[in-house]
Image (cartoon, rainbow, N blue to C red):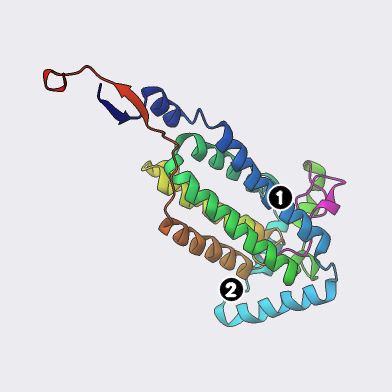
Amino acid sequence: MVTSLLPTSSTSADLATGRGRGISGRRELGFLAIVYVGYALTRVLASDALGPAVSRARHLVDLERPLLLDVERPLNHWLAGHDLLGTMAAFHYASAHYVVTTVVLVWLFFRRPEVYVAARRTLVIATSIALAIYLLAPTAPPRLVGGFTDVLAQHATTGWWGGEASAPQGLGWMTNQLAAFPSMHAGWALWVALAITASTANLVIRGLAWSHAVITGLVVVGTGNHWTLDVVVGWALVGFVWMLAQQWRDDTTDVRPVLVPHARTSLER
């Protein structure tokens, strides 16, 4: 009897729907857990000395001026003067960063496995690089420098966040207050746009994804949480790692050949 190497139809169905990925799913959760542990370590190990962090922030502003990027103060003052927009921006800053990124990551895992691996690599590597920068060069956000309004604190009574970044009220100690440079709020938002663009030809969905990236950039600056260069470098970091990730090759499926018997022909008897 002659056999041939073919994938089973059930395997193909599992791949199409994302089922049959128990071990792979646990591995992916492990990657995300490592990133979270890395963030927790930077929170514990990073210096909380405000003086050096403010000096770095002022150096960023000095770099921005000749590039005409020092728009933080007028944008922040404008947003702080509009309660409805300020509240919307606060909700966006405190939620979209986590919710949109997570939804897209899970959707890629189940629906676009051919995009997922490079996308996950980009997210993990870019975030890890940013965490290292937070640890080695803590930088103060505008709201801690003076002359800026902390828009999230201004509208803290309307949401779950407190006056310390986007942490829920009473849990500000869990956040790194001196992690302004680079902005991974902006970086992750660009990641969403790149991942969606690579996954669908629907122009409306692509437009929404890129709008999310632009709006996030405006929100993080307007709320007093990031400098313009924080956003630019966050975008550049994710964009660069994304391009590198596309050059790597990896099996995004787990198709194992099985032996499938077939009827013998007269030549095989």
Which residue appears at 55% of the width and 79% of the height?
Answer: 67
- Horizontal relation, residue 136 to residue 5: left or right: right
Residue 36 percent location from the top left of the image: 71, 50
Mark 2 and mark 1: Cα distance apart in space: 32 Å
- Name the N-terminal-most of marks 2 and 1: 1
Identify which residue, 230 or 32, lies in the foreground.
32
Q: Where is residue 4 drawn, in percent x and y? A: 28, 28
User: Callout 1: 10 Å neighbours few (<14), some, many (20+)?
Assistant: some
Quarter holding residue 164: bottom right
Q: Secondary structure at mark 2?
A: loop
Q: How many marks?
A: 2
> Where does the C terminus fall, quadrant-wise?
top left
Residue bearing mark 1: 36
Amino acid type at circle 1 is Tyr
Q: Residue 176: x, y in percent?
A: 78, 59
Check if residue 17 falls in the magenta segment. no
Residue drawn at point x = 44 percent, y = 45 percent: 115
Which residue is more in the foreground, 48 or 254? 254
**What stretch of residues is rendered in magenta?**
160-180
Identified by mark 2, the residue type is Leu
Q: Main secondary structure of the magenta part?
A: loop
Do the numbered discs 2 and 1 sit on residues whose CB atoms are within 8 Å? no
Residue that mark 2 sits on? 69
